Image (cartoon, coloured by chain):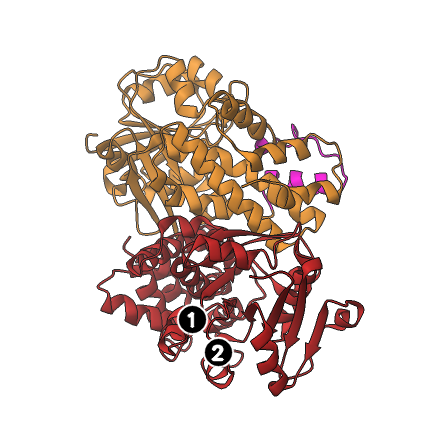
Chain colours: A orange, B red
Amino acid sequence: MPNPRSLVILGAGAWGSALALTATRSQEASRQQVQVWGRRPPYIEEAAASSSLSVFTDLSALADALKAASLGVVAVPTQELRSFLTDVLLPPHLPLLLTSKGLELQTGLLVSEMVASLGLPNPIGFLAGPHLASEVRKGQPTRGTCAAQTLEWAQTMASAFHGPMFQLTPWADLIGVQVAGALKNIFAVASGLLVGAGVGDNGRAAFLTLGFGEMQIFGQALGAQPETFMTQAGLGDFMLTCYSPLSRNFQFGFKLARGEHPDPRAPLAEGFFTAQAIQKRAVSLGLKMPALDKLVHVLAKPAPPLSEIETLITETRS
Amino acid sequence: MPNPRSLVILGAGAWGSALALTATRSQEASRQQVQVWGRRPPYIEEAAASSSLSVFTDLSALADALKAASLGVVAVPTQELRSFLTDVLLPPHLPLLLTSKGLELQTGLLVSEMVASLGLPNPIGFLAGPHLASEVRKGQPTRGTCAAQTLEWAQTMASAFHGPMFQLTPWADLIGVQVAGALKNIFAVASGLLVGAGVGDNGRAAFLTLGFGEMQIFGQALGAQPETFMTQAGLGDFMLTCYSPLSRNFQFGFKLARGEHPDPRAPLAEGFFTAQAIQKRAVSLGLKMPALDKLVHVLAKPAPPLSEIETLITETRS
């Protein structure tokens, strides 16, 4: 990428805003301009105070900004990404750093697979890690993984955000990082289910360990490198997500175990649908994922009793 | 081992008692007698109700029981183990299943290394997993790993406890399981430190991920198999211990970050001393463990400020 650089961040929700502020604190901050586009006026009061950060909502201005950009950073919710990328005119050579975790639920595709299915020729990267947006926004110390098809691209993209308080390791496995970012949500649902049912901390750690192993099996079948699951985007994000009681996925599992009949669509508990999509894909790949199978079975009940939830630990064949 | 079997459990604290009850619920329960020996009258009211479980405190009766035993299960606190094993007359062919996690702090040895240093010729196994004693006692669903020098020994020893609610996977890597059981305590101290200082959940997951990686490096230098760290005794116990706010190790770190000057000796925060012992051994092995080094540096301060604790995330070179 040239210097000075022009970053355009697509999406001004909590995550896009946090990333924009992070870019203004990066090692490259003095040499880059950051523009944030959002459908609604973005949630960044700090923008007024920084000459290198600007925000806008105009869709025609977005096309111009992208034409002049050296990196596009996509912070649009995963389930809205396809229609967004179809609507926006992306210059074909603009490198895109994806930051939306999870699967496209309708198709079961990883985000990079969905981008490929649209025929977009842009170089692709993926940023992930244990990244609660609220902490990143405040500049609390954080580490993460920035993956791309090549290590060179990963390094270039990472440098737009890398700084003392937000450190990124460049990584060359785009698939593994995305698999980890999608499948952790499944096990966060399981974590909530086990806590809600009072199965205990032993059983919870046991099931999460089985789940982590199956995540690796699934990832490797898709071509992921085994070491990717030991990075911040792998183990780090898995632990954060599964042990964070505030996530929608955990909350959905917790309420389901309490017999509260939560709706997985609102608020969206992605892990619930991801579990079904991954199971389907695992079957077509001929993979055995008994912990996932058992979880999908339990999640199919509208109010699974404790005796049923316990079978996650007692009846999963490993 | 012959059937009917005679199990002698050495140590009647919370863990020995939980294991004794587990043995009476195992798949082999109807074919095994369980005797629990403790210095103090053991904490097992249930013993009176079960004809296959008995408890005793007499040291001379212990020698006789061991002579007739088919498996000795050692549930004595790790730091008392050397003097205990020196005092008790162990028949040389009696297989011993060790269950005391952690290092011998005075020597920096793994428990199996300490047993070898005593010249004991007994076959050795090691039982570990995410095992809060209180949950195991109640029969809540649990999984774990039973390691020995050979898979056959591991299977035989596991069968004394394995049952629907307490499932054990036999495993042939004795070293890896012990390394995981010792080093998790170090990172539980770090977890408490980071939570106590308010560094945030992102940073905590990030440091634990670095620590888990260094645990693998250290283990492999000692001859552990990489896959061992993905078992219940590896990842499972690591997650349980690091995310459990009630452990002594977590509490020590938490109070240290709050400026409360806790004493690591009482109650014993093993992770504090384990960190120093592992660092010494890593140096002698020529290993690089930058996260551990940084942690030992921070733990050397009587009241490390937030700015110092943050360097665990920001200044560890990975």
Quarter the N terminus of chain A occupies: top left
Chain bearing tag 1 is B
Say whether disc 1 or disc 2 marks the residue closer to the N-terminus. 2
Q: Secondary structure at mark 1?
A: helix
Q: Position of residue A154 (x, y in %)?
A: 27, 34
Q: Measure how far apart labels 1 and 2 are at the Cα level.
A: 8 Å
* Label 2: few (<14), some (14–19) or many (≥20) C-alpha neighbours in 10 Å: some
Q: Position of residue B165 (x, y in %)?
A: 66, 52
Residue nearer the viewer, B225 or A178: B225
Q: Which residues are magenta?
A: A246-271
Residue at 70 percent of width and 30 percent of height = A263
Chain bearing tag 2 is B
Residue at 34 percent of width and 31 percent of height = A174
Residue at 60 percent of width and 40 percent of height = A316
Mark number, residue B111: 1
Mark number, residue B81: 2
Q: Position of residue B298 (x, y in %)?
A: 36, 69
Q: Secondary structure at mark 2?
A: helix
Q: Is residue B30 above or below residue B254?
A: above
Question: Visible in this render: residue B240?
Answer: no
Residue at 43 percent of width and 47 percent of height = A236
